[in-house]
Amino acid sequence: MPTTTVLCLGPAGAGPSFFRGWVAPDADIRVEPVSVPGRERRFGEPAQETVAGLLGVLVPEVLPVADAADRVVVLGHCYGAIVAYELCQALAAARPGLPLALVASGSTRPGVPRGGRITGLPDDEFVEGVERIAGYTYPALGRLELREVLLPPMRADVAMQESYEVDRAAPLLDIPVLSVRGADDTIVDAAKAAQWREITTGPFELAELEGGHMYLVEGWPGLLALVAETVRAWDHAGKSAP
């Protein structure tokens, strides 16, 4: 049975430890958090503030993983979903025919602006802004001694998201796309989540799981089960990439 490697990209400021403990329900699903410069083991590397700069770092690292996989699913949450979309564009261009799919979680589609810029605000206001747009209180940000470590990569990610402009000339993806939101998400409603249908000519699914915008903090088992179920359905229908 083919093995699916799920490349995971977290919300703003998150590193690979955001996905610590994630174990897929099926043995043929392998979770692979993507390590991003500026945090955790890559703390000494400069955080990237543009999607192009980040892709320049990530694509050469991810390609060998993709080449070794039977199938690749790129999963991103919130800000991470935009990076996941761009990473899928890069992988599809570099490896035509790669069995590839995208899972966009808790995010509006590329090119849909989100209001309320917070780049450049003083620390306290920035933290309040992050928690407002995330619909979630980050416990670590309440500890002043940790802010010096946590805020620079988070600021870089927010700046990246707020300056991001989708390439209107980029081709539509031709891969399966699954858009997921928390049923109680007050930031990304069902209509916004459904707009991901517009970025692919491949099959599209929209799903809701219990919880709010950050549903996956506790609800990741349901998300991985949904990914496994959806991949099987795509395979059964003969719709996933060859």
Image (spheres, helix red, strand yellow):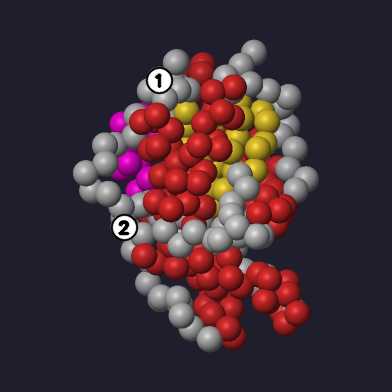
Whether the residues at callouts 1 and 2 have beta carbons within 8 Å, the answer is no
Against 146, is 208 above or below?
above
Asked if residue 146 lies left or right of residue 49, the reply is: right
Q: Is residue 76 magenta?
A: no
Residue 151 placement (x, y as % from top left)? 61, 73
Q: Which residue is mark 2?
A: 165
Q: Is residue 202 magenta?
A: yes
Q: Which residue corresponds to the image point at 54% horizontal and 61% vertical from the top-left?
A: 47
Residue 41 seen: yes
Q: Which mark is residue 97?
A: 1
- Residue 126 occupies which quadrant of the picture? bottom right
In the image, the segment drawn in magenta is 195-205
- The amino acid sitting under disc 2 is Glu
Against 163, is 54 above or below?
above
Element assignment for label 1: loop
Residue 85 placement (x, y as % from top left)? 42, 44
Quadrant (top left/top right/bottom left/bottom right) for the C terminus? top left
**Nearer-the-camera pick, 213 or 69:** 69
Which circle's residue, 1 or 2, is located before the other in the chain? 1
Quadrant (top left/top right/bottom left/bottom right) for the N terminus? top right
Q: Which residue corresponds to the image point at 50% horizontal and 37% vertical from the top-left?
A: 60
Residue 177 seen: no
**Nearer-the-camera pick, 144 or 10:** 144
Q: Which residue corresponds to the image point at 75% horizontal and 79% vertical from the top-left?
A: 145
Q: CA distance from mark 1 to mark 2?
A: 27 Å
Q: Which residue corresponds to the image point at 45% horizontal and 23% vertical from the top-left?
A: 98
